[in-house]
């Protein structure tokens, strides 16, 4: 009948003789079994490394959280142990600004964690736990990932410990804007389901190797989920462990993307019309000392084309700190060459 489930069972009577299984059915079963074995293998190997993270932002950090203590979990997420001495990778937005970080390991043990460093520009953070024999996950190589490859996401969505979802790599080389305003490059797109609480958990290959750090979904979309490539995470984690932060170059200006008039672009031999118009210059900054003025349009720095703020932010790496760089700008109808010396950035933000 319509609207009802009809249950069909084998009664075991004389009319229930087994039909021969076709070769195609056997092949399909083998394929499904292989898929299941791959997911199970990845989950069994990596799940012991996955942790649940709860953070508090107010109240005493000396006593455990208790009812009516004024200190309640303000957020939660996931992470995974990646070294034998208890370093844990997670997302910056999970632990940024935390006064207290509590971690639950895969075997149920609970411990406090110390924030080693976080980088909002890549949405990555490293914390450290003091626990006996933590199980580190094995890190893979995100450069070897291919579109269509099986991946498994492991995390704690809505507090459900070590939830496993599976999917494929949908695309490579995506860019995702972080909360600081910078673009994160080389992001993996996957349709392995992610939900609140998955942030910071591992995206794992069928070889049980971590290939990404789950970080974001598109609200209202189906199967549009993103993970920061593990090669990026490995580089950032090493710097955070060494320095507690990521060092970037800074020139001291704010700007907005503009399109130059085609006549000016042609007059100066530019192949594209995009540029970065200077909106403000910090006093006594490298930009100020270089003679950069509001209204100038930056078109190149260090010989590299600048079509907008994202290009400039990508180029301002630590290697350029203290280097004398050619800065080409359009001021009015004229093209000018200035010299600028970037310094080490001392504060986060969207300015360059």
Image (cartoon, rainbow, N blue to C red):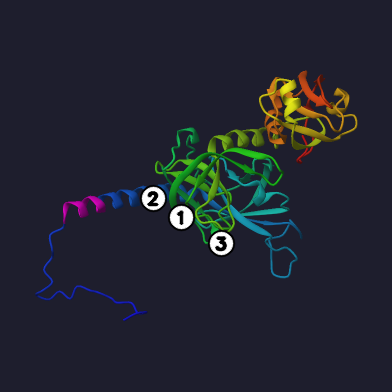
Q: Which residue is mark 2?
A: 39
CB contact under 8 Å: marks 2 and 3:
no
Q: Which residue is mark 1?
A: 164
Q: Name the quadrant of the N terminus.
A: bottom left
Percent x, y for residue 23? 17, 51
- Whether 95 is among the magenta residues is no
Question: Counting residues from the N terminus, which is met first, the one under dot 1 or under dot 3?
Answer: 3
Residue nearest the observer in this picture, 262 or 29: 262
Asked where in the image residue 261 lies, by quadrant, the reply is top right
Question: Which residue, as the protein is rendered here, is positioned at the far left?
Answer: 14
Instruction: Measure the alpha-carbon separation of dots 2 and 3.
Output: 21 Å
Nearest the eye: 145 or 108: 145
Query: Is 131 located above or below residue 71 in the figure?
Result: above
**Contact between labelled residues 1 and 2, with CB atoms less than 8 Å apart:** yes
Look at 75% across and 24% down and name the residue there.
321
Q: Nearer the viewer, mark 2 or mark 3?
A: 2
Magenta span dominant secondary structure: helix
- Tell whether 40 sits left or right of 106: left
Task: State the mark number for residue 159.
Answer: 3
Residue span colored magenta: 22-29
């Amino acid at each position: 009948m319509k609207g009802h489930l009809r249950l069909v069972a084998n009664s075991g009577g004389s009319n229930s003789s087994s039909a021969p299984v076709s070769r195609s059915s056997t092949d399909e079963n083998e394929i499904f079994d292989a898929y299941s074995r791959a997911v199970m293998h990845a989950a069994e190997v990596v799940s012991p490394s996955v942790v649940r993270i709860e953070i508090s932002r107010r109240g005493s950090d000396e006593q455990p959280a208790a009812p009516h203590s004024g200190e309640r979990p303000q957020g939660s997420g996931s992470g995974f142990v990646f070294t034998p001495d208890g370093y844990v990778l997670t997302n910056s937005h999970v632990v940024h600004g935390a006064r207290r970080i509590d971690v639950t390991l895969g075997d149920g043990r609970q411990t406090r964690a110390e924030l080693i460093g976080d980088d909002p520009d890549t949405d990555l953070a490293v914390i450290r736990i003091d626990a006996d024999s933590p199980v580190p996950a094995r890190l893979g190589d995100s450069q070897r990932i291919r579109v269509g490859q099986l991946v498994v996401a492991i995390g704690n969505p809505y507090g459900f410990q070590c939830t496993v979802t599976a999917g494929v790599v949908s695309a490579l080389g995506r860019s995702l804007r972080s909360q600081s305003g910078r673009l994160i490059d080389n992001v993996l797109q996957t349709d392995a389901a992610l939900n609140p609480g998955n942030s910071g958990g591992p995206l794992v290959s069928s070889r049980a190797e971590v290939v990404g750090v789950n970080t974001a979904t598109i609200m209202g979309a189906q199967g549009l989920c993103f993970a920061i490539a593990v090669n990026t995470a490995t580089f950032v984690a090493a710097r955070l462990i060494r320095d507690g932060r990521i060092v970037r170059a800074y020139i001291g200006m704010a700007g907005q993307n503009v399109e130059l008039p085609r006549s000016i672009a042609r007059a100066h031999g530019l192949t594209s019309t995009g540029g970065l118009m200077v909106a403000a210059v910090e006093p006594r900054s490298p930009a100020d000392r270089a003679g950069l003025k509001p209204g100038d349009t930056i078109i190149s720095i260090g010989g590299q084309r600048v079509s907008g703020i994202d290009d400039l932010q990508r180029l301002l790496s630590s290697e350029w700190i203290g280097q004398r760089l050619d800065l080409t700008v359009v001021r009015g109808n004229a093209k000018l060459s200035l010299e600028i010396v970037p310094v080490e950035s001392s504060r986060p933000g969207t300015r360059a």
